[in-house]
Amino acid sequence: MRRYFLFILLFVLLGYSCNRRTIRMEDFQVHGLDVSHYQSHINWQQVANQNIHFAFVKASEGASFNDTLFCDNWEGIKEAGMRRGAYHFFRPRVAVDEQIQNFSNRVDLEMGDLPPVLDVEVLDGVSKVDLITGIRSWLYTIEIKYGIRPIIYTNVKFYNKYLAGHFDEYPKWIARYNSREPILACGKGWDFWQYGDNGKVQGVKGNVDFNVFSGSLADLDQLCLRPKPIISIK
């Protein structure tokens, strides 16, 4: 009976530890969220009033999926005065040109917006070579279209196993649910860190992912889409 009780207690404690609330890392200057339709309708002005500076929003996935609340979130973030970014969930087995078209049809960037994000988390049964080839094609084409280098999002284990050393020149948004910062096998630093998925903020129903940016707010603005400098020819 005692052994049974200890087993139940251990099960409860493990369940509690896995679902504990994500506490904001106040040591960082710049904070953000990422959302999709799973968070339902969001009061972005309330969010902005809590020292949240940026938000990434799911726009598309694969060849045809579009997030149903993308437009509401996209406009709401702008009206609240926050920096906004859109992401595409990459499906390695789906034709890359169709995925590029899906995202491009959905997302119009304006000055001050964050770069497009490619969310890479699964292999879907393809080889590492095919994965890298597909990612590179998406990033290259999207950079030409929008005039800004995209961001790569993934978790630290996936990055180190499949992507390290291949995309060092791209900004990196790394998921690692821990109090310790991600360490990348390529030796490069991260730009955005998603450090937990059980955050709570007013204006968002339920849990939401918490993120930080590695630099200052001015550094974040430098990363955003900006007018091209005018070069005078004498």
Image: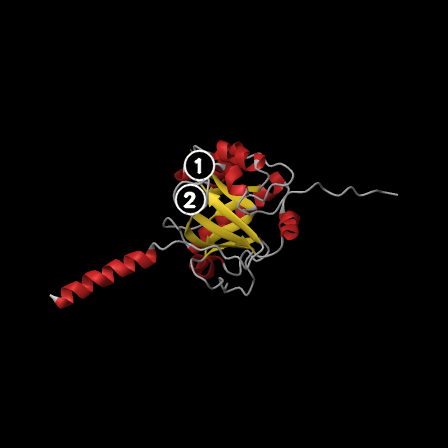
Name which residue lies at 41% across and 51% down.
Answer: 197
- Mark 1 in CB contact with mark 2 (< 8 angstroms): yes
Which is more toward the observer, 23 or 108? 23
Element type at marker 1? loop
Q: What x and y, as percent, mark residue 84? A: 56, 41
What residue sits right under mark 2 in the picture?
91
Question: Label 1: few (<14), some or many (≥20) within 10 Å?
Answer: some
Name which residue lies at 50% across and 35% down.
Answer: 73
User: Quick check: 37 above or below 224?
Assistant: above
Q: Is residue 86 visible?
A: no
Residue 63's disc is 1
User: Quick check: 111 above or below 212?
Assistant: above
Q: What x and y, as percent, mark residue 103? A: 51, 37
Q: What x and y, as percent, mark residue 113? A: 60, 41
Real-space Cα distance between discs 1 and 2?
A: 8 Å
Name which residue lies at 39% across and 53% down.
Answer: 21
Question: Label 2: few (<14), some or many (≥20) within 10 Å?
Answer: many
Q: Amino acid at mark 1?
A: Ala
Which is more toward the observer, 126 or 170? 170
Residue 129's disc is none
